[in-house]
Image (tube, rainbow, N blue to C red):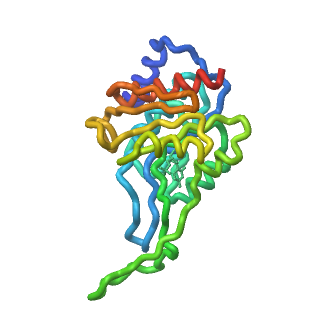
Amino acid sequence: AEPADIVAFVEDLLSEKKKSLRGKRLIVTAGATIEAIDPVRFISNHSTGKMGYAIAEALARRGAEVVLISGRTSLPTPTGVRRIDVLSAQEMYEASVREFATAVMCAAVADYTPEEVAPTKLKKGDGELTIRLKRTHDIAAELGAHKAGRILVGFALETDHEEANAEGKLQRKNFDFIVLNSLRDAGAGFGVDTNKVTLIDRAGREELPLLSKAETAEKIADKIESILK
Ligand code: C5P
């Protein structure tokens, strides 16, 4: 077995957490989507998928059946998780609808995609180039409109009016709770191994300290577990 699998297995043996989510099926979306412009170029964002992968791992360690719908990332698949690789927002949407269950929507999904994908590489000219973009599906909002008893957890990464924006998304996308990341906090956000988040639901908010992404994932899993009970 690979060393990482051996470590995961030993951690599992030593874990004090019971298999508290056994019999539950969950999906986690993670990472960045990629929207093709032509055969060699794309539009994407800085998400590395670390937070989503940590959540998938935490849920699987508690015995849940986890489907990780993943944009492009260089991370290894967590032990015990079924991973579906997708590229575009459209592919992530189709996989999420197909697998629809209680969901943690951690992915950084493109809101816009080129209206047309050029079949051959765009050639440079002297002047400016305009690429027209059209809206993608808002995966979280569409699942939220049909959630029927499923739990939905969203993420918000805000640069201004953080809490008001996150609360708006909680309502609009019909989340049970939303995890607010602020780019203002040192040690939070893209690529780093730590995070500082606030969990917001309809009853109020809980500000967590600076934690590793693995510890943040455990807190999020605890909250999901308490709602499922
Ligand atoms: O509106 P905003 O992109 O800030 O909302 C963030 C939340 O919505 C995240 O949970 C993200 O995964 C989800 N989302 C989505 N599909 C989109 C855009 C965002 O599922 N097209």
The x, y position of residue 208, in whole percent, is 39, 26
* Quarter of the image with the C terminus in it: top right
Q: Is residue 34 left or right of residue 124?
A: right
Q: Find residue 184 and report its image quarter.
A: top left
| Residue appearing at x 40%, y 64% in the figure | 43
Q: Is residue 12 left or right of residue 151?
A: left
* Quarter of the image with the N terminus in it: top left
Q: Find residue 176 and report its image quarter.
A: top right
Q: How many marks?
A: 0
Q: Nearer the viewer, residue 177 or 55?
A: 177
Q: Find residue 5 and report its image quarter.
A: top left
| Residue appearing at x 47%, y 46% in the figure | 165
The answer, for residue 119, to whether it is visible in the render is yes
Extreme right residue here?
148
The x, y position of residue 57, in whole percent, is 48, 30
Q: Is residue 76 left or right of residue 23?
A: left
Note whether 61 is above or below 169 in the view shown.
Answer: above
The x, y position of residue 106, in whole percent, is 49, 42
| Residue appearing at x 43%, y 17% in the figure | 10
| Residue appearing at x 64%, y 36% in the figure | 102
The x, y position of residue 6, in whole percent, is 41, 23
The answer, for residue 67, to whether it is visible in the render is no
Note whether 217 is above or below 110 in the view shown.
Answer: above
